[in-house]
Each structure stands twice: as structure tokens, then as C-alpha cells.
Image (spheres, rainbow, N blue to C red):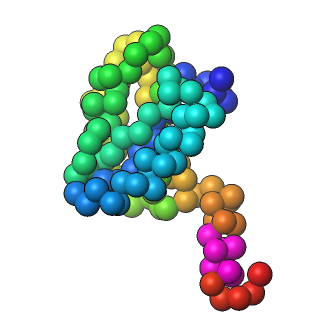
Amino acid sequence: MLRKEYDHIILLAHGSPDPLWKEPFESLYQQVSKVYGDGNVSLAYMELTSPSLEDVVAGLKGDFNTVAVLPLFLAVGRHLRHDVPKQIDALQRENLRIELLPPIGDDSLVKEAMQTVIANHLGKV
């Protein structure tokens, strides 16, 4: 069961033509889908690789009314201010509401994790 009012969450990574770049996102997706189920989460890429956000939304199986897009980005930039909202607007349907969530980098837990990693490298744990 998903938290809040979402029927499905799409993890959205930026994308890269380098197949090695995708590995951390694929691994994260596999871990999350094991916990929450394949039917509750998908992984999409904004550009340069597939599946695209459009592909994932078109392939949603089930009775979904509310889908959240969780950007696996560190911050809001041009893509999250302009490109992704434009993609989402084009995908909205009468029976499907798609909501863009803040990027994962805005979450205090992610910021704390990054501070811990930096401290580990500086030897000040």
C-alpha cells in the first residue's frame, strides 16, 4: 500500500546514453519494487534512455487515478521547472491525475545522508 493518495509512483531519473549510468537507478528501483510491489512503482527517464515517462504512463496496468512522479534529482533546475511539467501536462487524462513531487534532493533525509558521506570522506564521523 502506498502512502498518501497515490495509486502509483514513478521514479524519474534524468537519463544518459551510457548504460553504466543507469545501474544505480535500476538497483534502487529493484529494491523499492521488492518492498512495495512492481504494480506500485515504475522507473522512467526524462531523456536519452528508455523507458521514457510517456512510455511508463502508457504502459500502466490497472485502475490508477493518481500517479506521483518522484524526480531522482538533487535540485530543481530547468528540467523540473519547465520540461517535466510540460511532459506531465501532456500526459494528464480525465481519469488520471499526475502530480510532480519535489526532487529527492530536497528531502532532509537525503541531505543528512550526503553530509554523512562527506564527513566519512573527511574523516570527521
Could you say where residue 50 lies in the image, as x and y percent from the top left? 26, 42
Q: Report the front residue among 42 and 3.
A: 42
Question: Quick one: quadrant of the C terminus?
Answer: bottom right
Q: Residue at x 41, y 39 (%)?
A: 43
Question: Quick one: quadrant of the N terminus?
Answer: top right
Q: Can you see residue 89?
A: no
Residue 112 image-quadrant placement: bottom right
Q: Is residue 118 magenta?
A: yes
Q: Is residue 40 magenta?
A: no
In this view, 92 is above or below 22: above
Residue 31 image-quadrant placement: top right
Residue 123 located left or right of residue 81: right
Q: Report the front residue among 16 and 90.
A: 16
Could you say where residue 18 lies in the image, as x and y percent from the top left? 26, 60
Q: Report the front residue among 23 and 114.
A: 23
In this view, 17 is above or below 64: below
In this view, 87 is above or below 7: below
Highlighted range, magenta: 114-120
In this view, 63 is above or below 8: above
Could you say where residue 72 lies in the image, as x and y percent from the top left? 47, 52
Q: Main secondary structure of the magenta part?
A: helix
Q: Residue at x 48, y 16 (%)?
A: 65
Residue 11 located left or right of residue 44: right
